[in-house]
Amino acid sequence: MNLSKSYNIFYKTILADTVIRLSTHFRFDYEEAMDLFKLKKEKVYSFPSHNMNNYFTRTNFTNQILPIFATKLQHTIAFFKSEEGDLSSKTISEIASQWLEVAFKNGIEAECPKKDSEPDCKIFNKETQKMDPWELKCTTGENWRGGEYSKRPGYYVLMAYNITGENEIECFAGRLYLVESDWNKSKKNKEGKKNYYATTFGKKDLMAKIEAGEAEILFGSIERYRNNKCIRMTKQKIS
C-alpha cells in the first residue's frame, strides 16, 4: 500500500475516534462534534444524540400527558355539542394540537411558545439540563403534514387520534428524530403553486423508522400484516 495513503487512513481513523470521544465524554451533540471538524452532513442527524427518555418516558406520556389532552378535548367537544355548534375536522385538529401542547406544558417540564417561527414545545433534557425543541403533530388520518417550519431537524411526537360517538378519545402516538429529507414532498396544485403543507410523513415511513430502531411507540400499536404488505396502526382508548 502507498505510504501516503496509509497515513491518510490513519489520520482519518484518529479524527473519527476524536469526534466520538468528544461527543461521548464531553456530552456534545453529535452535530456539534461534526461541526468542529467541518464534517457536517445530513446523515449525522439521522439518529438522536440523546436518549429520548431524558425528556420524558412512555409512562410520563401515558399517565401525565394523555389524560390532560383527552380531558380538555372531550370538554371542548361536549361544549360545542351542548351549544349546537358545528366544528369542522380541520378546526378540531387545530384544537387538538393546542391541547396537546398544553398537556405537555402542564404534564412535564416543558415550554410552548405561541409563535409560528418557534417550535411547538421546548422540553427539558434531564441529562444536559437544557430545553430542546420538539414538534407535535396531530392527525385524524394516517399521514402527518409538515409546514414550512417542520422541515428543520428535530424531535417529533406524531399522534393520530379519533373521537368516538361516546366522546371518548382513542389515539396512537410515536416519537422520533426527523430531518427535512424524511418528509415526502407533495406535488403542486392545479395552479402550479406549492401548498403551505407541502410535506407529509405517513405510517409507512414511521414503520420503517421503527424497524430501523430510529423511532419509538408511545401509545397504541403499529404492525405489518398480509405477508408484510400492509401496515395497521391501532389507536388505543385514553383512560
Image: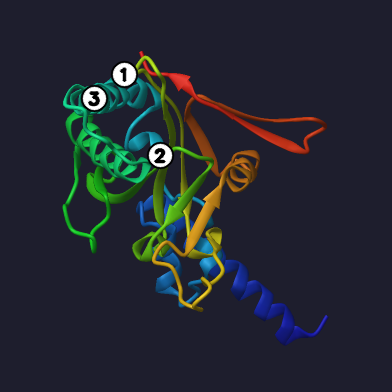
> Is the image coloured rainbow, by chain, by secondary structure, or in one colour?
rainbow
Residue 192 horizontal side relative to residue 68, left or right: right
Question: Who's the residue at 27% across and 50% down the image?
Answer: 120
User: Residue 54, image x and y in percent?
Assistant: 34, 36
Residue 43 horizontal side relative to residue 134, left or right: right
Write down the residue under mark 2: 52
15 shown above or below 228: below
- Count of number-bearing discs: 3
> The C terminus appears in which quarter of the rendering?
top left
177 shown above or below 57: below
Question: Who's the residue at 62% across and 40% down the image?
Answer: 207
Residue 169 sits in which quadrant? Answer: top left
Q: Secondary structure at mark 1?
A: helix
Write down the residue under mark 1: 63
User: Residue 163, image x and y in percent?
Assistant: 39, 25
Near-viewer residue (125 or 79)? 79
Q: Residue furthest front?
A: 84
Question: Who's the residue at 34% across and 19% down the image?
Answer: 167
First-in-chain label (2 vs 3): 2
Crowding at dot 3, Cα within 10 Å, few <14 / some 14-19 / many 20+, comes out as few
First-in-chain label (1 vs 2): 2
Near-viewer residue (212 or 20)? 212
Does the rendering let one see residue 192?
A: yes
